[in-house]
Image (tube, helix red, strand yellow):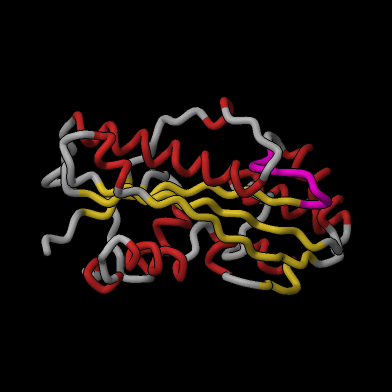
Amino acid sequence: MNIPTFVLASASPARRSLLETAGIQAVVCPSDFDEGQIQMQDATKLVQVLAQGKAEAVAKFLLANTHPHIPNPKSCLVLGCDSILLIDGEIHGKPKDAEEAISRWQKMCGKVGELYTGHALIDTRFDDFDEAMERSLIRCQVTKVHFAEITSRQIAAYVATGEPLACAGCFALEGKGGLFVEQIEGCHTNVIGLSLPLLRKMLSEMGYDVTDFWS
């Protein structure tokens, strides 16, 4: 079997790093998908639709254009992901500014949140986009995150680093934010941006072995 090029439809350094750690050298091809057009109250459906939108946008681009780092754009596996945090039944994405990040952390302290990440995988080994979509998988992984009780000074100092402004859920488990997480229930890589165990299962369902993508 010819192994397709693995394409990450995201500019997230954390997701790329996770894939590299797992031995997968992905070609990064961020989508221009407008997340703001999607408004849903169901967290699972929301992240799945957003992940699918990102993956579809990149798959359509590859099927119609050339790419300098992809030898055969019609032989790719495109992965799209999107994450949100659910706290007290309220959906949160990236904070828009430092003020919102501080307010968010004041709500998160001592609470248990649920981190939802949607995963969409599209096989582009077809000339027709509709055929490619028939080879797509869309899944969601949920992880519970127990946040520590931290002081106002610690919240302000953390937000001042800028780290939470770039993260869904307003924290980076793999960064300074990891200091303020007491416990994780479920897949920890899901909290960072994509679930490696879920990805392995999705690849298997598509007929691939994850080791096929080791470089």
Looking at the picture, how far across and down is residue 199, in whole percent?
Answer: 41, 63
Residue bounds of the magenta highlight: 87-95
Magenta segment includes 94: yes
Please say if 40 is above or below 111. above
How many numbered marks, from 0 up?
Answer: 0
Rendered-image quadrant of the C terminus: bottom left
Query: Which residue in the rendered view is the most extreme toward the top?
Result: 37
Looking at the picture, how far across and down is residue 137, in whole percent?
Answer: 39, 52
Please say if 128 is above or below 114. above
Looking at the picture, how far across and down is residue 21, in whole percent?
Answer: 38, 70
**Foreground residue among 204 and 105:** 204
* Left or right, residue 19 beside residue 211: right
* Left or right, residue 141 beside residue 180: left
| Rendering quarter of residue 35 | top right
Rendered-image quadrant of the N terminus: bottom left
Residue name at image x 54 percent, y 55 percent: 140
Residue name at image x 53 percent, y 46 percent: 48
**Foreground residue among 1 and 175:** 1
Magenta segment includes 93: yes
